[in-house]
Amino acid sequence: MSRPIWSSPWQPGPVVVPSDGAGPVTVNITEFTAHRPLDAAKVFVAGVMLRRSWPRTGGAIGMWLWMESGSLRPRSGSVSLWSDRARLQDFVVRPDHLRIVRAFRGKGALRSVTWSSSESRPDAVWGPVHRILSGQDPWPLGPDAPEGSVGP
């Protein structure tokens, strides 16, 4: 049985997308499943701290933090939209992000998936993402979901 997924409000980045929702954009989901509940809480707090810099993060369209609680191995992560994969990669190697990744290495399981979408409206992207996070749809196999899809 799937537990409810809680998400933070949409946090816009500096990149403004067309009002008609036309892409392309890069969508990324990350999921950290902690070995211990206390580590899950610490990861979530670290994510909140990173979220503060989001309005100044180059190439960022916007993001949500999400969490599933109520289990012995809680899950949490982020969903982010980017202008392109290169800007996502710039974020991944940022010193503040790397400090968090290194601090929690070995304290849980991490997975992520990235795909290109022709849809950039947050509400349209969240639906397919939520189905993955809630277990209604499987995580895509391989490193990428199909190109040009709204979701995996």
Image: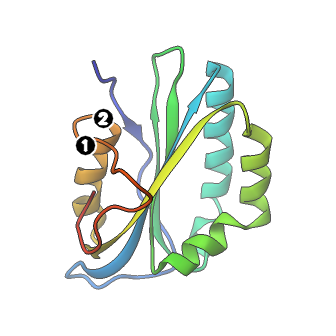
- Residue drawn at x 68%, y 27% is 39
Q: Tell me: residue 131, above or below residue 122.
A: above
Task: Report whether residue 29 is seen.
Answer: no
Q: Position of residue 136 (x, y in %)?
A: 22, 36
Q: Residues within 10 Å of mark 1 (few under 14, many from 20)?
A: some
Q: Amino acid at mark 2?
A: Ser
Q: Which mark is residue 134?
A: 2
Q: Tell me: residue 130, above or below residue 58.
A: above
Q: Tell me: residue 58, above or below residue 106.
A: below
The residue lying furthest to the top in this view is 72
Q: Quadrant of the N terminus?
A: top left
Residue located beneath label 1 in the image = 131
SS state under label 1 = helix
Out of 55 and 146, give the one closest to the viewer. 146
Give the CA distance from mark 1 to mark 2: 5 Å
Q: Quadrant of the C terminus?
A: bottom left
Q: Position of residue 135 (x, y in %)?
A: 29, 34
Say whether marks 1 and 2 touch (CB < 8 Å). Answer: yes
Q: Amino acid at mark 1?
A: Arg
Q: Tell me: residue 40, above or below residue 45.
A: above
